[in-house]
Image (tube, rainbow, N blue to C red):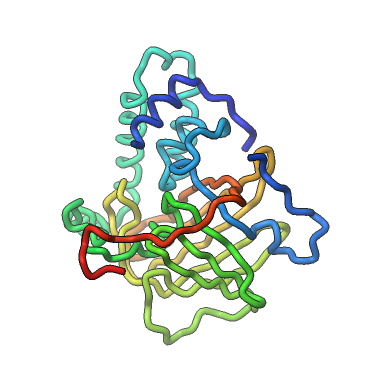
């Protein structure tokens, strides 16, 4: 993806809806994981950066690849200059939800119908599960942990180990919110495969839920000008999906950002 120069009006409107020069890691590094290390921040906390387009602001917690690309096309079309951000985003959202609904199995539709904002586990200080945490809006820090990688998410202050020693997923392991993740680096791409997750939501946007049979493959790439981390997350769940669901998200490299302790202070008993 190249640098975009979006219409300023779209950016102002989109930023309202949501409420440093990057350092370059040397390509000569002996550690193939080096480009991925450090702190990365999404559009939610870096809205004033010139890189972002209105489609990024609409997808601040990640979104389907098809939705992101469709939004970019709509915002770039001069024919839409007289339309509001909310009108365009509403049109794209309706199309995306219809496409997503068509991907759901009958049981997947049942689960989605039973979910509602007031039943969202996060309202009861239940941390995000795998999909929502991987695409959450707050910064994250990736570091070495011996031969493995460790991702520290600011959202819910969760830690996620990525095992890089070639091991397989354990056959008998109690499922967890973030599951069991194994990774490898191929041709400069960090590939993370995750399984053994507990059922949770796909996203606030879809309000659909996945089963414990969900598996995910994340493909992280680092690009420059500005330095950024992009992920393509492919999700498969034979219980709720009839075909793979592909989600995307982008973070900027923010070496001066410190990860802070997340709090659920409105709900006693958490943290």
Residue 67 x %, y %: 42, 38
- Residue depicted at x 46% and y 61%: 153
Residue at 79% in and 54% down: 27
Residue 217 placement, left or right of 131: right
Instruction: State the image coordinates of residue 17 (x, y, percent, origin top left).
Output: 34, 32
Asked if residue 162 lies left or right of residue 198, the reply is right
Q: Is residue 109 left or right of residue 183?
A: left
- Residue at the spot 36% in from the left edge and 32% down from the top edge: 92
Spot occupied by residue 104 in the image (x, y as percentages of width and height): 31, 54
- Of residues 39 and 104, the one nearer the viewer is 39
In the rendered image, residue 123, in percent from the top left (x then y), is placed at 22, 58
Q: Quadrant of the C terminus?
A: bottom left
Q: Residue 269 appears in which quarter of the rendering?
A: bottom left
Q: Is residue 87 above or below residue 158?
A: above
- How many callouts does the rendering have? 0
In the rendered image, the residue lying farthest to the right is 28
Residue depicted at 46% across the width and 33% down the height: 55
Q: Residue extending furthest bottom?
A: 172
| Vertical relation: 50 (above or below) 257 | above
In the rendered view, tell whether residue 88 sits above or below residue 26: above
**Residue 155 lies in quadrant:** bottom left
Q: Quadrant of the N terminus?
A: top right
């Amino acid at each position: 993806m190249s640098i975009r120069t979006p219409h300023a009006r779209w950016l102002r409107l989109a930023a309202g809806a949501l409420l440093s020069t990057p350092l370059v890691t040397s390509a000569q590094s002996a550690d193939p994981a080096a480009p991925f290390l450090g702190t990365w921040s999404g559009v939610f906390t870096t809205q004033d950066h010139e890189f972002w387009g209105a489609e990024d602001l609409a997808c601040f917690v990640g979104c389907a690849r098809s939705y992101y690309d469709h939004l970019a096309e709509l915002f770039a079309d001069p024919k839409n200059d007289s339309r509001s951000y909310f009108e365009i985003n509403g049109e794209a959202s309706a199309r995306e939800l219809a496409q997503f609904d068509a991907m759901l199995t009958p049981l997947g539709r049942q689960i989605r119908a039973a979910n509602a904002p007031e039943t969202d586990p996060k309202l009861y200080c239940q941390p995000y599960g795998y999909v929502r945490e991987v695409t959450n809006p707050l910064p994250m820090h990736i570091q070495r942990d011996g031969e493995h990688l460790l991702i520290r998410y600011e959202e819910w202050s969760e830690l996620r180990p990525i095992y890089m020693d070639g091991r397989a997923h354990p056959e008998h392991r109690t499922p967890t919110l973030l599951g069991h993740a194994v990774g490898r680096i191929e041709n400069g791409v960090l590939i993370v495969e995750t399984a053994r997750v507990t059922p949770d939501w796909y996203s606030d946007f879809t309000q659909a839920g996945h089963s414990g049979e969900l598996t995910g493959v994340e493909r992280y790439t680092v690009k420059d000008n500005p330095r950024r981390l992009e992920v393509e997350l492919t999700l498969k769940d034979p219980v709720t999906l009839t075909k793979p669901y592909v989600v995307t998200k982008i973070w900027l490299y923010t070496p001066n950002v410190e990860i802070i302790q997340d709090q659920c202070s409105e709900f006693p008993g958490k943290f």
